[in-house]
Image: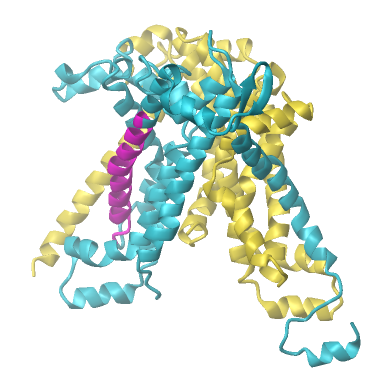
Amino acid sequence: MSDTDMTETEIAPVKRPARWHILVFLAPAFLVYTAVMILPLIETLRLSLFNMVEGQLSFVGFNNFKVLFSDPRLSADFWNALGNNVVFFVIHMLVQNPIGIAIAAMLSVPNLRFAAFYRSAIFVPTLLSFVIVGFIWKLILSPIWGIAPGLMDWVGLKWAFSPWLGRPDTALVTVSLISVWQYVGIPMMLIYAALLNIPDEVLEAAECDGITGWSQFWKIKLPLILPSIGIVSVLTFVGNFNAFDLIYTVQGALAGPNGSTDILGTLLYRTFFGFQNQMGDRSMGATIAAVMFLIILAGVSLYLFVIQRRMRRYQF
Amino acid sequence: MSKARSAPLRTALIHLALIAYTLVALFPVFLTLVNSFKSRNAIFREPMALPTPSTFSLVGYETVLNQGDFVGYFQNSLIVTVASIALVLLTGAMAAFALSEYRFRGNTLMGLYLALGIMIPIRLGTVAILQGMVAAGLVNTLTSLILVYTAQGLPLAIFILSEFMRTVSDDLKNAGRIDGLSEYAIFFRLVLPLVRPAMATVAVFTMIPIWNDLWFPLILAPGEDTKTVTLGVQMFIGQFVTNWNAVLSALSLAILPVMVLYVIFSRQLIRGITSGAVK
């Protein structure tokens, strides 16, 4: 490129011969990300199409998926885990997010004293590791220690106590609620931020029209924070269908009692890594990971291409 | 209108609800910390009471410190977390700068590619990651964890940082160019100092999942020398399930560093969220 070129390209982007610095800036992140995240992800998806045939890894098409969905031994575990995972997600959507929104709405009341304290305190569980959360709740709900029965006795509900984590019919709901307890902080923070971003003029205009308090929240604020609720929902979805740690610490890798808290993450761990007398199976592990990938991809695409498009965003 | 009369009542109800939920959020943590300082009998007889001189006991902490190599676990967690954050911040900021500053072919595509990881969890690639780490001879090393966590943290870091870098004034950068600064100098000496608040936010967001992760330590580095605190506590509790003093003390020790970090960084974290860094 010559100097004359440079002067006449006032409007067009300045073009220098080789801008190596762009490559230098991008390369480290690109290489680590590609090598450790994207390639393994692709390789896992590829592996899900292979399996051992007569001691040799060979291409089997969608056979692994067929086995996973219909083989009497594996498919029962899989459908059970998928069903439990759906319940796990539904409980989060019905309990965690409404509580998070309610707390955020209360925190954003103007001139509320101690708001910063409440906000910080309620966010504490979110920072704790699953190991801590899992064991604390295991201890609290344990009939041996008697914290939960003691507290329930105090409010006259002692008859209602039972070892929830140990009963197949209540274990899943209990574990889900523990997870809700831990993660309420995330919807709270994101919705709180969205509520703070609503301009005062909008709220003042509403007040001039006599819309205050409760109806102001439903009619003015809620429609304005819908995009944030959408983001919270998709984050919940991804997090829930990828969950593992809490179930593992509370109920162990077998996700007992009797598989009643087994979700896709724990099933993946057991299948891939093996547990007790079950041998680890790389191909079936990859197949389960591929199914989880497709579920998450479907959820995220639904959000990006359907829900987000239809949502009205207000520019202030 | 009844507004003036109902306002104090409404505020009182809001405080009541918030206090109630704060208790729900903090009670389990409080219970653990308090009981970790009590003797075994007191833990069972009066679980809700504060430790008194007659019930005070450090026997749980003694067991933990004598039986488990907690100092080693802490060291491992610290090395992994600090190294990963440093790599995420440095390489992430560089990539974010390239994406936000220069126009080049494939810019948007590259941005989308690097953002994929925000929504798709890295865990789904575990089967092949383990395979790769075995091939590279990195199993049971802290390096394997650092690499995985760096890759895990990069997408969100690049996304947040490039949003922030777009707000750095062009005039400043062009003035630097006229003064003969190289592109590298512009990045390191002009832009980086200006986005420091965003870097702190990213650091906090990156740190929490790394410190708390159980999955990758369990799969990639379960050896005694490379256990992180999270895995160490998990395994320790598994062995000492019936020793309540030890379990409660181990939990308290695991809570402590997170709480210290939270107190230091909470303002940064909350500012980061409310300023729209993660929208």
> What hue does chain A carry in this figure?
cyan
Q: Which chain comes out yellow in the rendered image?
A: B
Q: Count up the numbered dots.
A: 0
In the rendered image, residue A84, in percent from the top left (x then y), is placed at 35, 29
Considering the image in quadrants, where does the C terminus of chain A appear? Answer: bottom left
Q: Residue at x 69, y 65 (%)?
A: B106
Vertically, is B279 above or below A87? below
Please name the predominant secondary structure of the magenta segment in the image: helix
Q: Residue at x 42, y 49 (%)?
A: A234
| Magenta stretch contains residue A76 | no
| Residue at the outermost left position | B1
Q: Residue at x 66, y 32 (%)?
A: B128
Residue A229 located left or right of residue B121: left
Give A85 or B195, whichever is nearer the viewer: A85
In the rendered image, residue B207, in percent from the top left (x then y), is placed at 59, 42
Residues shaded magenta: A83-109
